[in-house]
Image (spheres, rainbow, N blue to C red):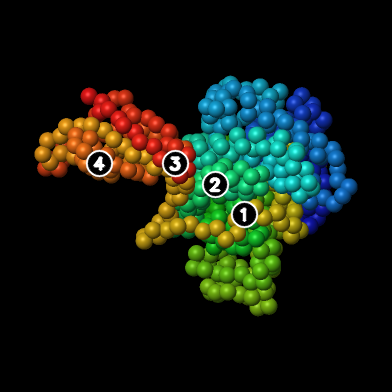
């Protein structure tokens, strides 16, 4: 049995978590005096492990908590927090300029995961790039910019915009590329990263529109549509959970997906499954699969019944520091459940689908699919038990929090003693957000409401190519009877280098071959011409180098008169 109740623990730990978070921000935080102004250290721990660095991801999540608190506070606000936020924005702008092992400001450097706390590059070996940082940072700065706009300070927003745009441009250009996940172990596509990128692009498009930057708004919106489309591919219908990484050789069950769901929470979106809102059937089914995976692997979880809360970690196969529960992942489970309860209460009902049925049957074994209004006995029974379940995860962490209130990264899977990095800033941030969710305080909507995706006849998502331009391709080539000239290249409109998908040119003025193709605007791509023999199937490629060109702006056209490379 647990010795802590959620309410008692929240009342005791809440102020300590806020103080612990601020103590880790330089230079005035008492744990971060060596850090540059506005730099959030991950932890003051310098050995086993050394976390005395600033991660772009962690810092963005920490300052999102600060920005939201500042914006939510009644006047007069704490001006020291405003100073802290401005210092963060300035520090991040400077870090964008720091050349590092991932590149410079124009060659991929924004994907660098961490920096020294004096704003210099960390040059040691590491899992890089990590592509969630720019999107998370943009989301935090956009939240601040929106508050500034609401308070008639567009001038300051204009000073923030260059930093925000650099991050959004990086996300728009790189969201569909692989990188290391948030645990810095697996290089592949990651659900967490894609979700963070989608939100950043969606919010970025709206801010760009507000600032009359319409072309950028359209570009970001297009790529947000595509990221949302790709987000659907992580769902594992056979296991009814989110496959958090496309690589890594593991089950795919991972706190990555829980953290993504609460980061994507938009109270106006209801229980939307496209964005994996916390109360969506997919997110709830995924939550059950995630929690269940830890029931038998930690000694401290022994003896708990089916619907009792337990300690959870990053993923069941974890071996880092021997694979322990984490404070932030256990808080995240509670937060998703609280978020769900807030939405159900706001809309006055909850829905059970075949996908989420097993989640709800933990609390009422005979419940069936259907819609249950707030005035029904089923609704009352389920929400009461789910709230107790959520409180249990808070209480679990409370049971393993020392009297000082210090939150490390992890606690021992068998003895519950805090371990790994001490005073982890992200642990404090996760405590704060889960406590707010417990109290029914929901974040500001960010644009997830009413989103849709296009599907083909088989139900698969169709990407949005965005603004288009037109290119006329011309090349001279003598051919034999039965031979035709085609073009293929690095983009889908040219068949992605597959001869079978190449586009045929017409010999209207033989030996000149011509074709008119719509190409995404302002896109750099490469291509080659090939000759295909319709009788033998033989394909003859022109020699290197590839032709390379940037397509014209939206709505414009160009004629390319090429020479075949013999």
Res 556 label: 3
Which mark's residue is nearer the viewer, 4 or 3? Answer: 3
| Circle nearer the N terminus (4, 2) | 2
Residue depicted at 55% across the width and 69% down the height: 352
| Circle nearer the N terminus (1, 2) | 2
| Circle nearer the N terminus (2, 3) | 2
Q: Which image quadrant for residue 136?
A: top right
Residue 189 or 175: which is nearer the viewer? 175
**Residue 455 as seen in the image, left or right of residue 30:** left
**Residue 400 as seen in the image, left or right of residue 476:** right
Q: Residue furthest bottom?
A: 376
* Residue 415 in sight: no
Other residues around mark 3 within 10 Å, as few (<14) / some (14–19) / many (≥20): few
* Residue 269 in sight: yes
SS assignment at label 2:
helix
Residue depicted at 55% across the width and 39% down the height: 171
């Amino acid at each position: 049995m647990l010795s802590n109740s959620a309410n008692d623990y929240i009342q005791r730990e809440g102020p300590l978590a806020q103080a612990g978070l601020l103590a880790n921000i330089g230079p005035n935080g008492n744990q971060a005096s060596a850090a540059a102004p506005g730099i959030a250290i991950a932890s003051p721990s310098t050995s086993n492990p050394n976390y005395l660095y600033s991660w772009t991801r962690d810092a963005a999540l920490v300052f999102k908590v600060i920005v939201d608190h500042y914006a939510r506070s009644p006047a007069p606000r704490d001006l020291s927090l405003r100073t802290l936020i401005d210092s963060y924005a300035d520090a991040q702008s400077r870090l964008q300029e720091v050349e590092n092992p991932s590149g410079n400001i124009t060659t991929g450097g924004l994907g660098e995961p961490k920096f020294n706390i004096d704003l210099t590059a960390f040059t040691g070996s590491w899992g890089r790039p990590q592509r969630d940082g720019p999107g998370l940072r943009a989301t935090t700065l956009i939240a601040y910019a929106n508050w500034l706009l609401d308070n008639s300070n567009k001038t300051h927003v204009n000073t923030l915009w260059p930093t925000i745009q650099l991050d959004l441009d990086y996300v728009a250009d790189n969201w569909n590329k692989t990188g290391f996940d948030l645990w810095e172990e697996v290089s592949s596509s990651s659900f967490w990263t894609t979700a963070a990128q989608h939100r950043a692009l969606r919010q970025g498009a709206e801010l760009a529109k507000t600032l009359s930057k319409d072309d950028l708004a359209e570009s970001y919106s297009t790529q947000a549509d595509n990221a949302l489309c790709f987000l659907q591919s992580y769902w594992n219908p056979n296991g009814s959970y989110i496959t958090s990484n496309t690589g890594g050789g593991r089950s795919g069950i991972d706190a990555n997906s829980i953290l993504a769901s609460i980061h994507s929470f938009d109270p106006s979106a209801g229980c939307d499954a496209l964005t994996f809102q916390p109360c969506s059937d997919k997110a709830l089914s995924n939550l059950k699969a995630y929690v269940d995976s830890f029931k038998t692997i930690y000694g401290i979880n022994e003896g708990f019944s089916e619907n009792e809360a337990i300690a959870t970690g990053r993923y069941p196969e974890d071996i880092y520091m021997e694979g322990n529960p984490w404070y932030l992942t256990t808080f995240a489970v509670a937060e998703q459940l609280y978020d769900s309860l807030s939405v159900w209460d706001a809309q006055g009902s909850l829905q059970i689908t075949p996908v989420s049925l097993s989640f709800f049957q933990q609390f009422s074994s005979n419940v069936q699919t259907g819609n249950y209004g707030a005035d029904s006995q089923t609704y009352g029974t389920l929400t009461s038990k789910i709230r107790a379940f959520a409180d249990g995860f808070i209480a679990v962490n409370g049971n393993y929090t020392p009297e000082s209130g210090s939150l490390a990264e992890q606690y021992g899977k068998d003895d519950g003693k805090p371990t790994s990095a001490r005073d982890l800033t992200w642990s404090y941030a996760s405590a704060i957000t889960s406590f707010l969710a417990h109290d029914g305080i929901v974040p500001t909507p960010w644009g997830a409401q009413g989103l849709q995706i296009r599907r083909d006849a088989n139900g698969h998502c169709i990407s949005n190519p965005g603004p288009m331009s037109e290119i006329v391709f011309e090349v001279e080539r003598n051919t034999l009877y039965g031979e035709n000239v085609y073009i293929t290249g690095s983009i889908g409109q040219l068949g992605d280098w597959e001869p079978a998908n190449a586009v045929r040119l017409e010999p209207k003025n033989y030996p000149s071959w011509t074709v008119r193709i719509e190409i995404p605007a302002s896109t750099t791509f490469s291509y080659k011409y090939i000759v295909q023999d319709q009788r033998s199937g033989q394909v003859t490629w022109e020699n290197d180098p590839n032709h390379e060109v940037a397509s014209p702006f939206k709505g414009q056209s160009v004629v390319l008169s090429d020479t075949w490379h013999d």
